């Protein structure tokens, strides 16, 4: 099977250019901290690099949606423009979770399965007066619920997931936007095609449930297993309660 190529290029840079003469756009130097301590720390302390796509996987019930809602709320508080797209749960369910978490800052939410339609909405929102200079974050829950316009009823399997992720990645690279895309895995922590998807994104976070250490059993374990724009910040053990997460232990990266 032919490998998919992403349509992501460094504009107007001739092949063979001396790397020391390449001018990095200023947008890529201005990292954005999300304001959630353990996520920023997992990213190496610097935050998200504009244009970066993060793949966020975890076992069912580990708290991925809860964590992303807390992050969306914190980003909005700091002035970022956030779109939370969910097809895993109804917006009524999401609102009930937001109330339980005591979220205070309204962000944009919707249920769109078509990637072209979702990105068109993002464009419309970004181009509104007052929004153009704001950091932009798209949070997708989850990749498996999306279609790329070719398979509109959930068909297409792994190839469909790769195309959807490629479209989101292209959009982020073009507009210096950020995306966090949730991927569902089974109870053994596996997801079909995840190795290919891992190579398509800039960073990858995992959330699991600790079962081996008796002192930390039941805690959620957050790890950054890949980060092109900085080092991984270690392993974070988090207690999940009705208000979200509380850090209880941290193992620094070697």
Image (spheres, helix red, strand yellow):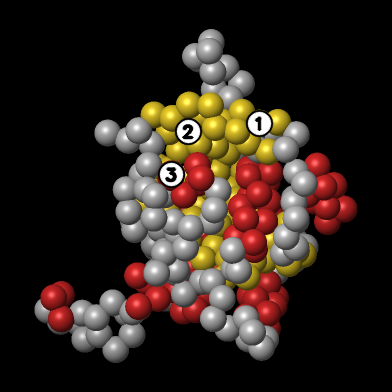
142 up-or-down from 184: above or below: below
Report if the CB atoms under discs 3 and 2 are less than 8 Å apart. Answer: yes
Q: Position of residue 81 (x, y in %)?
A: 63, 70
Q: How many marks?
A: 3
221 up-or-down from 124: above or below: above
Pick the front one: 102 or 24:
102
Mark 3 highlights which residue? Answer: 42
Q: Quadrant of the N terminus?
A: bottom left
Helix, strand or loop at label 2? It is strand
Pick the front one: 149 or 110:
110
Question: Reading the chain from its start, which is encountered first: label 1 or label 3?
Answer: 3
Q: Position of residue 161 (x, y in %)?
A: 57, 58
State how far apart marks 3 and 2 are (Cα): 8 Å
Helix, strand or loop at label 3? It is helix
Dot 2: few (<14), some (14–19), or many (≥20) neighbours within 10 Å? many
Question: Reading the chain from its start, which is encountered first: label 3 or label 2?
Answer: 3
Helix, strand or loop at label 1? It is strand
Mark 1 highlights which residue? Answer: 240
State how far apart marks 1 and 3 are (Cα): 17 Å
State how far apart marks 1 and 2 are (Cα): 12 Å
Left or right, 201 with reference to 74: left
Report if the CB atoms under discs 1 and 3 are less than 8 Å apart. Answer: no
Mark 2 highlights which residue? Answer: 236
Tell me which corner region of the image, top left, top right, bottom left or bottom right, holds residue 173: bottom left
Residue occupying the point 68% across, 72% down: 118
Left or right, 12 with reference to 67: left
Dot 1: few (<14), some (14–19), or many (≥20) neighbours within 10 Å? some
Report if the CB atoms under discs 1 and 2 are less than 8 Å apart. Answer: no
Residue occupying the point 70% across, 31% down: 241
Q: Is residue 72 visible?
A: no
51 up-or-down from 244: above or below: below
């Amino acid at each position: 099977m032919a490998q998919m190529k992403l349509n992501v290029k460094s504009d107007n840079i001739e092949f063979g250019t001396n790397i020391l003469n390449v001018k990095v756009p200023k947008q890529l130097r201005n990292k954005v901290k999300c304001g959630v301590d353990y996520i920023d720390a997992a990213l190496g302390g610097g935050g998200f690099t504009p244009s970066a796509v993060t793949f966020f996987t975890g076992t069912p019930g580990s708290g991925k949606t809860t964590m992303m809602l807390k992050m969306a709320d914190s980003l909005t508080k700091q002035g970022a423009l956030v779109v939370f797209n969910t097809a895993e749960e109804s917006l009524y369910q999401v609102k009930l979770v937001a109330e339980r978490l005591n979220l205070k800052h309204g962000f944009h939410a919707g249920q769109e399965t078509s990637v072209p339609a979702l990105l068109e909405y993002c464009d419309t929102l970004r181009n509104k007066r007052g929004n153009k200079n704001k950091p932009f974050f798209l949070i997708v829950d989850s990749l498996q619920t999306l279609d790329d316009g070719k398979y509109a009823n959930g068909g297409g399997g792994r190839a469909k997931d790769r195309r959807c992720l490629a479209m989101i990645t292209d959009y982020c690279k073009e507009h210096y936007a950020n995306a966090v895309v949730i991927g569902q895995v089974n109870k053994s922590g596996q997801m079909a095609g995840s190795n290919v998807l891992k190579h398509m994104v800039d960073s990858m976070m995992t959330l699991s449930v600790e079962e081996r250490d008796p002192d930390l059993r039941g805690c959620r374990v957050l790890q950054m297993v890949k980060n092109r724009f900085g080092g991984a910040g270690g392993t974070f053990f988090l207690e999940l309660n009705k208000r979200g997460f509380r850090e209880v232990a941290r193992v620094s990266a070697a």
